[in-house]
Structures are given as structure tokens and as C-alpha cells.
């Protein structure tokens, strides 16, 4: 699946919006990506998971592992493609990522750690540590979308994604979209109707 094909699926699903958005951080952006809206379509989720999983075929992955919540469906679909099991780590009361629900990783099992979207990669990195703490070996990493300023890289491991996505953000005082006269809207809200004269 090419990056263009992936982005077309995202646009069709309403997961990738273009315009002038007010983000929850207070910053403005011409793009908004909400991966959950893409994965809301099970057939699409399977397709993108297969495309991502195919890139890691042949590495000998035994288990796909993701941080909750965003990565769960991605790990599940990649695991379907690779015919391995899918686990997720979740935060306990102290905020630490941990395997619960009786999930286990056998010593020396080879794991692929996955996210939906990687920006700084913090949760993915933490999940790698969870795998290692259980005696597993992380052999690959991946995300549907790499949103980082620089291409994502985790240790010296292979990293797979379906696209890189540049999402510029602006302080409202320096936003070129504001300067051109448009008004930022919250993603998902309808643009205000122009009142006819
Ligand atoms: Zn703006």
C-alpha cells in the first residue's frame, strides 16, 4: 500500500481533515488526523494491518504488542496478517504500562511493538521495555503513521509505517491561516454558515 493509497483511505474515512483547526493544545494546524476514525471501519483496519504486517513478514515475529488504547487495533490486525497473537500493555494506577489480564510473553519470544500514530514514540518505547522485562526480544517496531519531525527510529530496530505525515502546528499569533483571514475550528465541528447578505 502506497502512502497515497493510505491517505486516500484516511480521507474517505474522515480520519484526515484539511482546513484550519484549533487543537486541544490551543495551537492551530491545517491538518487533523484521527486514526480511530480510520480503524472504525473493520475492513479498512484489516487492510492497513495487513499492509503493515506484510512489511515485517519473514522476520519471525511471534507476538504483536501495543500500548493501549490507540495501538490495540493496529497490533490486532498486524497479528492477524502475521498469524501471531496480539497483546496490549495498559497503564496501572501508578501510570506505568504493564501487561495485565493474564497476558504473558515467553522468554526469548520475538515481539513487534506497534502504535497507531507515532509522534515522539514515548508509549512505544515504554512498551518495548515491558516486553524486555518479560524476557521477550523486540525485533521490530511499527505504526500506521509516522508523525514525527524526523523519521521514527527505535534503537537500531526496523521501523515500518504506511506513511509519514507532516502536521504543521502554529501558535495562533503566528498562524498563516489566521493571517489570511480564516477562523480556526475544532476538528469535527461544522464550519459556520456564511450569513447571506
Ligand atoms: Zn490559525
Image (cartoon, rainbow, N blue to C red):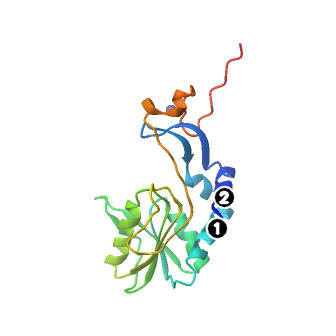
- Give how far apart the Cα atoms at labels 1 and 2 are: 18 Å
**Near-viewer residue (77 or 8):** 8
Crowding around mark 2 (Cα neighbors within 10 Å: few <14, some 14 to 19, many 20+) is few
Ligand 1 within 8 angstroms of badge 1 C-beta = no
Residue at the extreme top: 197
Q: Residue at x 49, y 83 (%)?
A: 62
Image spot of residue 174 (x, y percent): 44, 32
**Near-viewer residue (51 or 148):** 148
Against 62, is 97 above or below? above
Image spot of residue 172 (x, y percent): 45, 32
| Closer to viewer: mark 1 or mark 2 | 2
SS at mark 2 in the image: helix
Image spot of residue 138 (x, y percent): 41, 78
Q: Quadrant of residue 38?
A: bottom right
Crowding around mark 1 (Cα neighbors within 10 Å: few <14, some 14 to 19, many 20+) is some
Quadrant into which the C terminus falls: top right
SS at mark 1 in the image: helix
Against 176, is 150 above or below? below
Would residue 85 be seen by someone viewing this image from the given angle?
yes
Which residue is label 1 attached to?
A: 46
Q: Residue at x 56, y 54 (%)?
A: 36
User: Which of pointers 1 and 2 lies earlier in the amino acid sequence?
Assistant: 2
Which residue is label 2 attached to?
A: 4
Quadrant into which the N terminus falls: bottom right
Ligand 1 within 8 angstroms of badge 2 C-beta = no
Against 155, is 31 above or below? above
**Near-viewer residue (91 or 28):** 28
Image spot of residue 94 (x, y percent): 28, 59
Amino acid at each position: 500500500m502506497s502512502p497515497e493509497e493510505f491517505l486516500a483511505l484516511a480521507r474517505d474515512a474522515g480520519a484526515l481533515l484539511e482546513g484550519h483547526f484549533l487543537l486541544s493544545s490551543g495551537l492551530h494546524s491545517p491538518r487533523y488526523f484521527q486514526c480511530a476514525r480510520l480503524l472504525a471501519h473493520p475492513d479498512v483496519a484489516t487492510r492497513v494491518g495487513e499492509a503493515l504486517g506484510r512489511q515485517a513478514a519473514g522476520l519471525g515475529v511471534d507476538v504483536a504488542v501495543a500500548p493501549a488504547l490507540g495501538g490495540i487495533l493496529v497490533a490486532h490486525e498486524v497479528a492477524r496478517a502475521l498469524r501471531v497473537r496480539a497483546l496490549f500493555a495498559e497503564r496501572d494506577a501508578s501510570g506505568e504500562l504493564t501487561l495485565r489480564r493474564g497476558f504473558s510473553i515467553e522468554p526469548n519470544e520475538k515481539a513487534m511493538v506497534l502504535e497507531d500514530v507515532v509522534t515522539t514514540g514515548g508509549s512505544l518505547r515504554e512498551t518495548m521495555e515491558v516486553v524486555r522485562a518479560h524476557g521477550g526480544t523486540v525485533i521490530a517496531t511499527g505504526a500506521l503513521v509516522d508523525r514525527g519531525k524526523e523519521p521514527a527510529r527505535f534503537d537500531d530496530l526496523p521501523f515500518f509505517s504506511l506513511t509519514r505525515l507532516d502536521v504543521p502546528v502554529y501558535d495562533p499569533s503566528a498562524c498563516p491561516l489566521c493571517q489570511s483571514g480564516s477562523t480556526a475550528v475544532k476538528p469535527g465541528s461544522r464550519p459556520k454558515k456564511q450569513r447571506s447578505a
